[in-house]
Each structure stands twice: as structure tokens, then as C-alpha cells.
Image: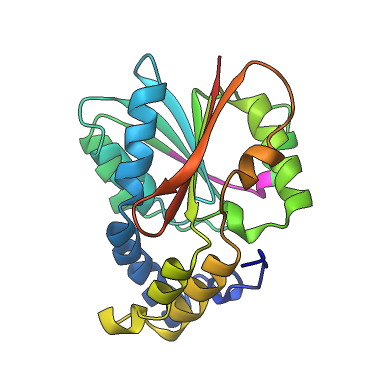
Amino acid sequence: MTRRVEPEWLDVLPSADPRAMRSRRDLERVNALMTNASIVADALRSTLASWPATIAEIGAGDGAFALRVARALPGRAATYTLLDQQAIVSSDTRAGFRRLGCTAHPVQADVFAWLADSATQRFDAIVANLFLHHFESGALSGMLAGIAERSNVFVACEPRRSRTALVGSHLLGLIGCNDVTRHDAVASVVAGFHGRELSALWPSTSGWTLDEGPRGLFSHLFVARRA
């Protein structure tokens, strides 16, 4: 399938819209089915040499995914920066990080402005979950260049663009997902990644080790590590 980026309904619905709130709950189940948190946690475990670590998630939403990653890394304290255009990280989610010995700092900003801001710190790792596929290749190339300037490790878990994933996306109604989730799941697969498409967009500077390929039935993993 040719990659095609289409608008997703959750991106334009107000955060307090009941259908958007329901879809965010649906996404927690979808992420669990895709095992994305475990995939990202395994990548961080194998690439980060020392802990405590500083980790930023771009497109973090309500912070639920980052919290699942933290739970999959028991005993590894970290400071998590949760970047999103909406301020929707709850006090309960922050408390969940504290119980794990971690700290969560929500940041409301546009990812491109944040990466370009000289005040933005460097991180041991930046992660993204089901986020990069929202962008066309030109914008993605610029984003990845900014990420390379701000981190030593980058881990992205994205939809895999495949026939199997497309069939799966059409079946989410069977587990009770609402219309927003069902629409966006199909759009996500069509905009997802295959082969080494993200590696081709990574800045062509030496000193990085890149790993990219399928994980599980529906996910596509990209890992960049500074040598």
C-alpha cells in the first residue's frame, strides 16, 4: 500500500468531547492489544546504559502510555516529560508516576516549536507512540532532525502498514471501540510505516545506529541510538 496521511477525528475533537474521551479509553485497550508499551520499554531497557534517566514522550496525550512504559520498567526511576498540544494529564496519572519513584512533567506545546526552542533540554531518550504517522514525509524529516539534536536515543512505535493490520483495524468494533476509534484506526494503518521508511528520513549524519522493522502483528518499531 502507498502511504497516505489522512485527518484523524481525535485530533480535531475538543478534549472534553464525550466521543473523544471514549476514544482515548479505547486507545488504552488498543495499545494493550498491540503491546506497544512493552515494546517501547524493552527498547529503552536495551539502549539506555544508566538510570535514573530523562525521557520525553512527544504526542503524549493524557500520559497513560508513558505510565504503562514506566510500569514495565520496575526499579528504573526516570523523569518523564509529557509533551502534547492539549493539557489533559490528570492528577491521578501524575500520582501513578510518583508511586513508581518517577516524576512526570506535562508540557503543552507544538512539537516543532518545542524542538526548535533553545530552552528545551537534552534527554537521554525521546519516545513516540502512534504519533509519527500523523505527518507527511517532509515534516517528519524536520521533526526527526530536531529529535536527533535533543536526545541520545529515539524510540518510535507506530502502526505497521500492512494488509494484516488493515484487516485488524476494521475489526475494532468487535471489542466495543466507538466510531472515532474505528475511523482513526483505519487512517492510522494507511499512514503507517513499512520497511526502512523512517531510517531513510533520519538525518544523514554519522554516529547513529538505526534499527527498524515489524514487531508483533500490527506494530512497526524504529530505534535510533547515538553511538
- Image quadrant assignment for residue 40: top left
Q: Position of residue 124 (x, y in %)?
A: 49, 22
> Would residue 183 appear left or right of 96 to someone viewing this image?
right
Q: Is residue 110 magenta?
A: yes
Q: Position of residue 121 (x, y in %)?
A: 60, 25
Rendering colour mode: rainbow
> Would residue 21 appear left or right of 190 to someone viewing this image?
left
Instruction: Pick out the residue farthest to the right.
Output: 138
Q: Which residues lie in the magenta part?
A: 105-111
Decide which of 137, 83 is in the foreground and name it: 137
- The answer, for residue 170, to whether it is visible in the render is yes
Image quarter of the N terminus: bottom right
Question: Total marks drawn?
Answer: 0
Q: Position of residue 167 (x, y in %)?
A: 42, 76
Decide which of 164, 92 is in the foreground and name it: 164
- The answer, for residue 113, to whether it is visible in the render is no
Q: Is residue 217 magenta?
A: no
Seen in the picture, residue 104 relative to 61 is either above or below; the reply is: above
Decide which of 145, 67 is in the foreground and name it: 145
Q: Residue at x 47, y 72 (%)?
A: 166
Seen in the picture, residue 75 relative to 173 is either above or below; the reply is: above
Q: Residue at x 56, y 14 (%)?
A: 227
Q: Position of residue 134 (x, y in %)?
A: 62, 60
- Image quadrant assignment for residue 117: top right
Seen in the picture, residue 51 relative to 169 is either above or below; the reply is: above
Q: Residue at x 40, y 68 (%)?
A: 24
Q: Residue at x 66, y 63 (%)?
A: 3
Seen in the picture, residue 174 relative to 56 is either above or below; the reply is: below
